[in-house]
Image: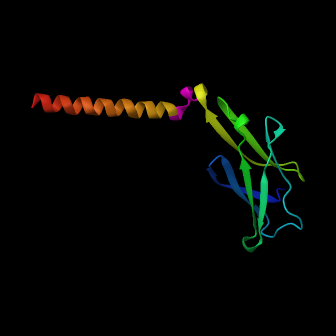
Amino acid sequence: MQNWILTKTRLFEGVWEAVLTPATGTAPATGPDIAVTHLQEPVPDVTLTEKPEKALWVLRVPVPADRIADGVQTFLISDRTTGETLGSFALLSGDALSYDIRAEVTLLREELDMLKRAFRRHCLETM
């Protein structure tokens, strides 16, 4: 059973942020012992800040510049105490995206806009 629930809040200025809340509603006696890894290597400078008034912990993961590369880069967040994976986040970039469905949708939208302009121009010219 997981002791913590991880909820992503944002990725801003190269820092991925999330909050950890107790799974049972009451915080365990000790705070979470979190490990963040990329390609099975620990990510440095991860911080965990307690917010006792809100009964949560704020997790901040600065994404190291040397970990940003073409393709999909996945970062795993796990509980060292239980060994369970709490969550993950991925960065997608480069040529690998050219085959991604989102890139295809964007390309289709651009082509549709071009066709709409051409059709409107044709209608104005034939009136």
Relative image position of residue 47 (x, y in whole percent): 78, 55
Residue occupying image coordinates x 79% and y 43%: 43
Of 105 and 17, nearer the camera is 17
Residue 22 in sight in this render: no
In this rendering, position of residue 70 left or right of residue 29: left
Task: From the viewer's perspective, tell me whether residue 31 is left or right of residue 73.
Answer: right
The residue most toward the bottom is: 53
Number of marks present in the image shown: 0
In the image, what residue occupies the spot 68% across and 53% down? Answer: 17
**x, y percentage for residue 98?**
54, 26
The structure residue drawn at horizontal position 62% and vertical position 35%, both measured from the top left corner, is: 92
Residue, far left = 127
Q: Which residue is drawn at 23% across and 30% down?
A: 119
Colour pattern of the rendering: rainbow
Please indicate whether residue 119 sits to the left or right of residue 100 in the image.
Answer: left
Q: Measured along the vertical axis of the image, is residue 53 above or below residue 80?
A: below
Q: Quadrant of the N terminus?
A: bottom right
Task: Give the camera-side residue of 96 and 25.
Answer: 96
Q: In which quarter of the image is the C terminus?
A: top left
Q: Position of residue 38 (x, y in %)?
A: 77, 38
- Residue 59 visible from this viewpoint: yes
Q: Is residue 99 magenta?
A: yes
The secondary structure that most of the magenta stretch takes on is: helix
Magenta span contains residue 13: no
Compared with residue 25, is residue 72 higher up or lower down, i.e. above or below? above
On screen, residue 122 versus residue 115, left or right, reads left
Q: Where is residue 12 in the image (x, y as percent from the top left)?
A: 62, 50
Vertical relation: 55 (above or below) 117: below
- The span picked out in magenta is 97-102
